[in-house]
């Protein structure tokens, strides 16, 4: 999985830098010829649209941004198509929104489509569907989008190509390896380019999502010569994020990261220890509070007594039922609910711990 951003793809005039587009396409084509399946997440639609429409700066109005993205997306795909065509590779446009990942069926459709495109030797080129996304449904930046796609297809590595050469320490040197993406946030300088919507903070968030799922993530300079080929050859280029020891199965990745949580429950210390330390299912006896309105099968957040999120899972009970049985023993459920019921509020097979 390779992600490139607007800042990396454009020149000082804000135009798409075709020399660099071709350089990235050449490297990806080489990797495909060597047997790798490569998916490309590419920003740049708004930057291309700005240039096409003669706008001197990025619009702030959402409606205008959507229109500019609609103009620019066709030009962006034309350029990628031309860059890959000389290698005999077709490209496939995939535009997605947050809702596509939150919905289980659409999430699976994304994964299945990418898999089939790889089998056909076509290059999936993915971007957020800016023409229909608004603030409340946006993914926010393509770093997070790339992480979600990485986990959906269980890609071995996410390479975030950046305009900087990696994560820098306080002395300005590139950190070669990081085993705690959360801790690395302290190294981030909060700055953002005029063309992009992300920054190093979102790249670290994306790296955390991928490594928590058990895969490798890399942040490296996108303009470094043959950077993708050098990485696959094992050369140290940029910052590598160490994956968790255990890989999450695809279904758990959706529950823990992609699916939308629609409610919350708070549990006591004993239940929190049982869930996080002993891998137990969540029982009603440990529940102290229920927040929100949800139904059976929805994803809900589990919080410890301090309010910290410790897990997410698929609930066996609706919110009102959970409020009825919270703090009660399983043997009391049938009398309280008027029917036979599950022993667990969230079974351990449907419970995903937050972080590692």
Image (cartoon, rainbow, N blue to C red):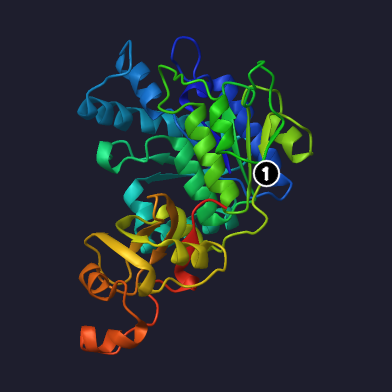
* Mark 1, residue position: 242
Q: Residue furthest front?
A: 269
The image quarter containing residue 339 is bottom left
Q: Is residue 125 visible?
A: no
Q: Is residue 158 visible?
A: yes
Q: Is residue 225 left or right of residue 202?
A: right
Q: Secondary structure at mark 1?
A: loop
Q: Residue at x 28, y 61 (%)?
A: 289
Answer above or below: position of 226 versus 323: above
How many numbered marks have been drawn onto this rendered protein structure?
Answer: 1
Answer above or below: position of 153 versus 143: below
Residue 193 image offset from top left, x and y in percent = 44, 18
Residue 243 image offset from top left, x and y in percent = 65, 48
Residue 108 image offset from top left, x and y in percent = 44, 62
Q: Is residue 215 left or right of residue 146?
A: right
Q: Residue at x 79, y 39 (%)?
A: 233
Residue 54 image offset from top left, x and y in percent = 31, 13
């Amino acid at each position: 999985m390779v992600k490139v951003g607007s800042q990396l793809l454009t020149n000082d005039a804000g135009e798409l830098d075709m020399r660099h587009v071709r350089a990235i396409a050449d490297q990806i084509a080489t990797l495909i010829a060597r047997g790798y399946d490569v998916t490309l997440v590419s920003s740049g639609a708004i930057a291309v649209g700005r240039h096409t429409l003669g706008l001197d700066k990025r619009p702030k109005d959402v409606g205008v941004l959507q229109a500019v993205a609609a103009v620019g997306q066709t030009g962006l795909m034309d350029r990628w198509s031309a860059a890959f065509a000389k290698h005999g590779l077709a490209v496939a446009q995939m535009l997605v929104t947050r809702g596509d990942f939150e919905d289980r069926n659409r999430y699976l459709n994304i994964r299945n489509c990418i898999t089939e495109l790889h089998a056909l030797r076509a290059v999936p080129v993915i971007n957020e569907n800016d023409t229909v996304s608004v603030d409340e449904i946006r993914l926010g930046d393509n770093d997070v989008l790339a992480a979600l796609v990485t986990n959906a297809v269980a890609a071995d590595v996410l390479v975030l190509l950046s305009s900087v050469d990696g994560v820098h320490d306080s002395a300005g040197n590139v950190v070669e390896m990081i085993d705690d993406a959360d801790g690395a946030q302290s190294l981030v300088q909060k700055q953002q380019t005029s063309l992009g919507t992300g920054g190093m903070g979102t790249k670290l968030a994306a790296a955390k999502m991928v490594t928590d799922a058990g895969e490798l993530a890399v942040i490296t300079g996108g303009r470094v010569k043959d950077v993708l080929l050098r990485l696959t050859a094992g050369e140290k280029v940029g910052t590598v994020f160490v994956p968790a020891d255990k890989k999450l199965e695809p279904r758990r990745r959706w529950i823990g990261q992609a699916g939308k949580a629609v409610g919350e429950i708070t549990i006591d210390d004993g239940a929190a220890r049982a869930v996080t330390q002993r891998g137990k299912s969540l029982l009603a006896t440990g529940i102290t509070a229920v927040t929100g309105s949800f139904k059976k099968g929805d994803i809900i957040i589990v919080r410890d007594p301090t309010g910290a999120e410790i897990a997410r899972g698929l609930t066996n009970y609706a919110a009102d039922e959970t409020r009825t049985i919270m703090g009660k023993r399983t043997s009391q459920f049938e009398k309280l609910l008027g029917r036979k019921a599950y022993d667990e509020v969230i079974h351990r097979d449907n419970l995903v711990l937050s972080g590692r």
